[in-house]
Amino acid sequence: MDYLQQYLFIDIETVSGEADFEKLSPPMQEFWVKKALTLKLEPDVMPDESYVRRAAIYSEFAKVVCISIGCLMQRDGQWKLYLRTLTGHDEQDLLTRFCKALGQFTEREKDLILCGHNIKEFDIPFLCRRMVIHGMDLPKCLDTSSKKPWEVNHADTMEMWRYGDKKNFTSLGLLAEVLGIPTPKDDIDGSMVGTVYWQENNLERIATYCAKDVLTSARVFLRLKNIKDIVFEPVYLT
């Protein structure tokens, strides 16, 4: 089972780039209005409301405020999931610290495999786009632009659960529930992250939520791999 130590489980939390629509520059307001027209929203939803509700999932209009990572390691015959969560208001600094953490992990495990729920369609593309916006070099493990599909060394629990059914979308919480995996009780969900950030300025609360998703992703991954003889203890690093 030593190969499990190659996996780095990740999850990110994103919020709108500004607290509200009015704080956007005039060009960005115009671009959001055009974007909103392409979204399947109720006819009476105004751009300012749609921005607050939906901007966080579009990398051109949002930013990363939290990244959690976790790796499985065996110590004294017992498996543990070591979790570390990075947060920050300065996105470029946050992404730089994340890249440094990736580098430290790859020094130990050369054959790094990033793993998470829906990371191929959301987390990894989002991180790459935001790094490009900030003029940063992309870590090799993130940059898939010149790779063939079979060369991408990422493990996505949503893709694993789809079994080729591309139209299927299953949330991490639902997947954990149907697989009988106990999940930590959250006081927030993904739809509340923007409010917690912009109105409460509570990055610690977001970090707790993000780390729980990494913990759940690791458990789901082991279940999908039918690995039953590993029960790990989470260790939260600062």
Image (cartoon, rainbow, N blue to C red):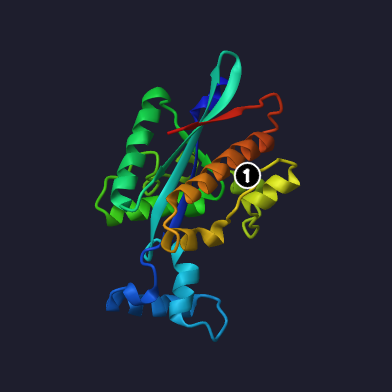
> Which x, y percent locates residue 20?
39, 72
Q: Is residue 236 above or below residue 229?
A: below
Q: Residue at x 51, y 75 (%)?
A: 39
Q: Where does the image place residue 230, in percent across and percent down from the top left?
A: 66, 25
Image coordinates for residue 217, horizontal then vertical, percent: 59, 41
Left or right? Give the position of 186 relative to 196.
right
Left or right: where 21 falls relative to 72? left
- Residue 163 in view: no
Residue visible at 68% across and 48% down in the picture:
175
Q: Quadrant of the N terminus?
A: top right
Q: Amino acid at mark 1?
A: Met
Q: Nearer the viewer, residue 227 or 96?
A: 96
Towards the viewer: 25 or 23: 23
Q: Tell me which corner region of the image, top left, top right, bottom left or bottom right, holds residue 28.
A: bottom left
In the image, taking residue 144 as reference, residue 11 lies left or right, namely right
Q: For mark 1, what is the residue?
A: 160
Near-viewer residue (212 or 144): 212
Can residue 107 be seen by looking at this rendering? yes
Question: Crowdedness of circle 1 by 10 Å Cα count: few (<14), some, many (20+)?
Answer: some
